[in-house]
Structure formats: C-alpha cells, structure tokens
Image: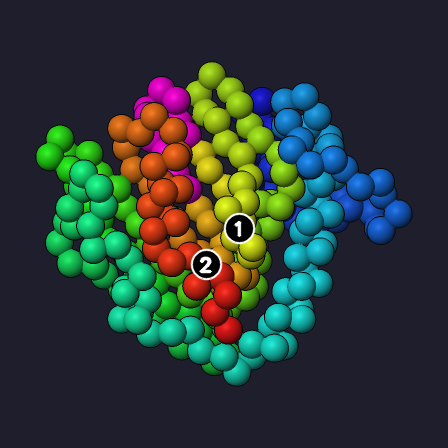
Amino acid sequence: MKNLKTLLLTFPIILFTACGGNDEPKEEDNIDIEKNPLGALVKMSENMKENAEKMEKNMEERKNAKAIHYEELMKYLPGSIEGYSLKGDPKGASMDMSEMSYSSAEAKYINDGGDKINISLLDYNAAYSMYSMATAMWASGFKIDTSEEYAQSINLGDNINGWESYKKKRNRASLILGLGDRFLLTIEGNNQENCDFFKEIAKSMDIDELANMD
C-alpha cells in the first residue's frame, strides 16, 4: 500500500504516459485506491492529460498576466481564527521572472494550548504550469484510507477542488484547495479530529471570490 501511494504521488509522468488515448472507458468517481488501484492510476492519467491541454490554453491566455502583489494577497488571510490568535505578522513575497510571476502570503496561528495552524495562499496567475502539476490528481475522485492516514479529493464549490488529508496517529490535518485554476490555499495544523475545522476556515476566507477572479 505504501509503495502504491508513493507511485501515485511521486511519479506523475508514469501516469501521464499510461493514459493511452481517448478511447479508454471513463472510470467512475470516488475510486478507492485500496480496492481499485489500477482504476485510480487510469483515472489520474486521464485527468493529467486533460490538465495538460487546459494548461496549454491557459498559459497562452495568461502569458502577459501578473500575479497580484503579496500585500493584496495578505488581505484574504484571517486576522484570527476561532480559538486561535495570530502569531507574529503575516509574511509574503512576489516574484516576476520573464513571462512567469507568482506571489505568496502566509500566516501562523496559535491557541492557549500551544496548538498551531498554518495558512498559506499562493497566486499562480502567470505560472500555470506550476499550478497544474500541483493539482493534477485532485479531480480523480479517489481516496486513501489506512491505519495511519485518511485522504481524499474534495470539491467545495464551483472552481474549488482540492485534497484533504488526516494523519490518524499524529492528529495532524491538511487541506489544500485550488481556486479558479489560479490560487492555491493550504491549511494545516496539529491536534485536529479531522479536516472539518479547516474547511470552515477556508469558507470564511472569501474563496468564492478568489475562485472567480480574472
């Protein structure tokens, strides 16, 4: 099981070349990686092929676009979270390089018990190839459930897809959302029972606005 998971997450090029064309039967959604590992591989390879075509189109449309400045990105980060307060000041950065630009903003939060939550938001407006590689597997609809981890692809609305992961023995949760094929939101922290709290945090951050931003 561990080797299969590593294959899925670490070697996307194998999955991409395994697609074999448009005549393959369409796999059902919500593929359980333990019960149907081959189906998960085929489904991911199909999605990667679709993403590659979408990437080519979006890169042409966005070749002269710029990511918003990190100071504007910071405004979408929560000033506080229920039960948590902001730890220090948010950090950010913007980068322009030839025809590629992206920006990032990050904040850390802590509660009275010392538990921590980290939130980062990235704008890949003119770096779509980086975004596409990060999100290729999310539309596959498969899940992982072992004695150590539960993880699955999720959808929280129009143009909002992602991946939730929960480490059962460490009580550590992670939520990654792609917003409008442009923004990447990551929320992670310790001492959680599942990823539900992080989903509520994400919904409080105007993710619908980000997902529909030109």
Q: Is 176 positioned to the left or the right of 16 in the image?
A: left
Circle 1 is placed at which residue position? Answer: 157
- What residue do we see at 53% from left, 61% from top? 180
- Label 1 is placed on what type of residue? Gly
Outermost residue toward the bottom in this view = 64
Label located before the other in sequence (1 or 2)? 1
> Which numbered marker is on residue 47?
none
- What residue do we see at 28% from left, 57% from top? 77
Residue range of the region highlighted in magenta in the rendering: 166-175
The image quarter in which residue 84 lies? top left
How many residues crowd around disc 2 within 10 Å: few (fewer than 14), some, or many (20 or more)? some
> Which numbered marker is on residue 208?
2
Q: Is 1 positioned to the left or the right of 85 in the image?
A: right
The image quarter in which residue 190 lies? top left
- Label 2 is placed on what type of residue? Asp
- Residue 29 pos. (x, y %): 69, 36
Is 95 in front, or is 54?
A: 54
For label 2, the SS is helix
- Residue 31 pos. (x, y %): 67, 31
- Residue 113 pos. (x, y %): 13, 31
Is 78 in front, or is 9?
A: 78
Q: CA distance from mark 1 to mark 2?
A: 8 Å
The image shows residue 151, relative to residue 54, as above or below, that is above
- What residue do we see at 63% from left, 65% from top? 55
How many residues crowd around disc 1 within 10 Å: few (fewer than 14), some, or many (20 or more)? few
Assess whether mark 2 and mark 1 are in contact (beta carbons under 8 angstroms). yes
The image quarter in which residue 171 lies? top left
Q: Is residue 171 magenta?
A: yes
The image shows residue 42, relative to residue 113, as above or below, that is below
Is 61 in front, or is 194?
A: 194
Is 182 in front, or is 46?
A: 182
- What residue do we see at 71% from left, 45% from top? 45
